[in-house]
Image (tube, rainbow, N blue to C red):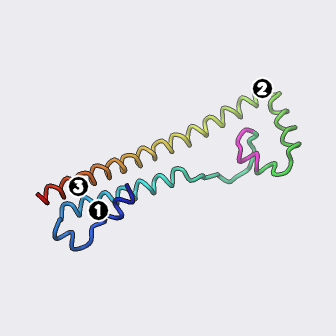
Amino acid sequence: MGGFLVKSVPRLPDFDAYPLRAVLLSVATVCVGISALISLRTVAPRLRTGEARSLVYFDHIARRYPTGRGAFIENYVRLATDEGRFLENVIEQVWANSLVARRKFRRVSYAVTFLGLAMVTSGLAVIVHRAWDL
């Protein structure tokens, strides 16, 4: 879709010759761009900095134990034997993942909306162009 729109981006004379088609293609191009930017922002990993204290979250494990596999295993086994603390760690991670998933889901919804708008406006541009040529 983006390639089609880039190839069809209206030139300045197109706005005089085919104003509606040019505007529709311009809107479609902008919508695809917005959709792409939202999508990239959504899928780009963002790891928060701060104290690495969780034994369940992968980034905290990797930062806290970059070479200490044995120390990680020892601390994890100690945590796993304390059912209350272990459950609290897992629940905390479920909560954090829920926030991330909700934010990503909302962004994907926006990206899909803009992509749909781009598809509709580019389709209208094709219809207008064909009707103009009749």
| Distance from the alpha carbon under mark 2 to that under mark 3 | 63 Å
Between 112 and 90, the one lying in front of the other is 112
Q: Mark 1 or mark 2: name the one nearer the start of the chain.
A: 1
What amino acid type should be assigned to the residue bearing mark 3?
Val
Quadrant, the C terminus: bottom left
On the image, the x and y values in percent for residue 51 come to: 73, 50
| Horizontal relation, residue 13 to residue 87: left or right | left
* SS type, badge 3: helix
Q: Is residue 8 magenta?
A: no
Vertical relation: 106 (above or below) 12 = above
| Horizontal relation, residue 95 to residue 112: left or right | right
Q: Label 3 belongs to which residue?
A: 126
Name the dominant secondary structure of the magenta segment: helix
Question: Dot 3, crowdedness within 10 Å: few (<14), some or many (≥20)?
Answer: some
Q: Label 1 belongs to which residue?
A: 26
Instruction: Give the magenta part as a residue range.
Output: 56-62
On the image, the x and y values in percent for residue 80 come to: 80, 30
What amino acid type should be assigned to the residue bearing mark 1?
Ser
Q: Nearer the viewer, mark 1 or mark 2?
A: 1
* SS type, badge 1: helix
Q: Nearer the viewer, mark 1 or mark 3?
A: 3
The residue sitting at the top extreme is 83
Q: Mark 2 or mark 3: name the one nearer the start of the chain.
A: 2
| Distance from the alpha carbon under mark 1 to that under mark 3 | 13 Å
Q: Label 2 belongs to which residue?
A: 83
Vertical relation: 110 (above or below) 86 = below
**What residue is drawn where x is 35% and y is 56%?**
31
Q: Mark 1 or mark 3: name the one nearer the start of the chain.
A: 1
* SS type, badge 2: helix
Question: Dot 2, crowdedness within 10 Å: few (<14), some or many (≥20)?
Answer: few
**What residue is drawn where x is 84% and y is 33%?**
77
Task: Report the disc number at residue 64.
Answer: none
